[in-house]
Image: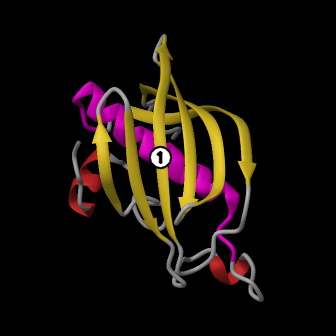
């Protein structure tokens, strides 16, 4: 099991502020599972618009946190780091359920387990908890593909 601080997280993810959704990895068993932490701060850039009277973390960003944790797990499993030659993409989201709102001050614990891999597409079982309370769950599919040059 491996604990990763923010500097190690940044070396395993291409995302940066404001879309970086992982602050720390608490546990990582390459080829099996990861447990990652997102500190949900009142300073997050989406809270003024979602919603001004009752700040709630958008569900799509909880799913993004799951995908980023899965990305770290894939790169650790493959013993690689992201580079400019490839992009880590969502390939699908199944069975997504949101059980309770995530608010400023919450610590979101994201657990991702590898369910399988076939032809470069990885399937993960994901849960997000605040304390002992399940706040979201989903099965996600992700893949690493060669980066195409930007259109000119």
Give the image quarter of residue 29.
top left
Hey, which residue is sitting farthest bottom in the picture? 53
Between 107 and 55, the residue placed more toward the observer is 107
Q: Residue 65's spot in the image, x, y percent?
A: 51, 53
- Horizontally, residue 147 falls left or right of residue 100, namely left
Q: Give yes or no for residue 79 being in the magenta stretch.
A: yes
Between 89 and 127, the residue placed more toward the observer is 127
Main SS of the magenta part reads: helix
Q: Is residue 65 above or below residue 140?
A: below
Q: Residue 108's spot in the image, x, y percent?
A: 51, 63
Q: Residue 46's spot in the image, x, y percent?
A: 62, 74
For the point 67% across and 84% down, the residue is: 48
Q: Is residue 146 above or below residue 61?
A: above
Residue with the mark numbered 1 = 111
Between 54 and 87, the residue placed more toward the observer is 54
Q: Quadrant of the N terminus?
A: top left
For the point 72% across and 43% down, the residue is: 96
Crowd class of label 1 (few under 14; some 14 to 19; many from 20; radius 10 Å): many
Q: Is residue 145 above or below residue 81?
A: above
Look at the image and give the residue range highlighted in magenta.
56-81
Q: Give yes or no for residue 38 being in the magenta stretch.
A: no
């Amino acid at each position: 099991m491996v604990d990763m601080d923010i500097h190690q997280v940044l070396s395993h993810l291409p995302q940066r502020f404001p879309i970086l959704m992982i602050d720390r990895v608490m546990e990582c068993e390459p080829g099996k599972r990861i447990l990652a932490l997102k500190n949900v701060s009142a300073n997050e850039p989406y809270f003024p618009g979602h919603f001004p009277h009752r700040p709630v973390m958008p569900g799509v960003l909880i799913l993004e946190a799951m995908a980023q944790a899965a990305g770290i797990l894939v790169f650790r499993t493959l013993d690689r780091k992201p580079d400019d030659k490839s992009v880590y993409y969502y390939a699908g989201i199944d069975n997504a359920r949101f059980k309770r709102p995530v608010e400023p001050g919450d610590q979101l614990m994201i657990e991702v387990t590898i369910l399988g891999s076939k032809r470069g597409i990885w399937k993960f079982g994901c849960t997000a908890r605040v304390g002992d309370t399940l706040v979201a769950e989903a099965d996600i599919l992700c893949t690493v593909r060669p980066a195409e040059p930007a259109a000119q």
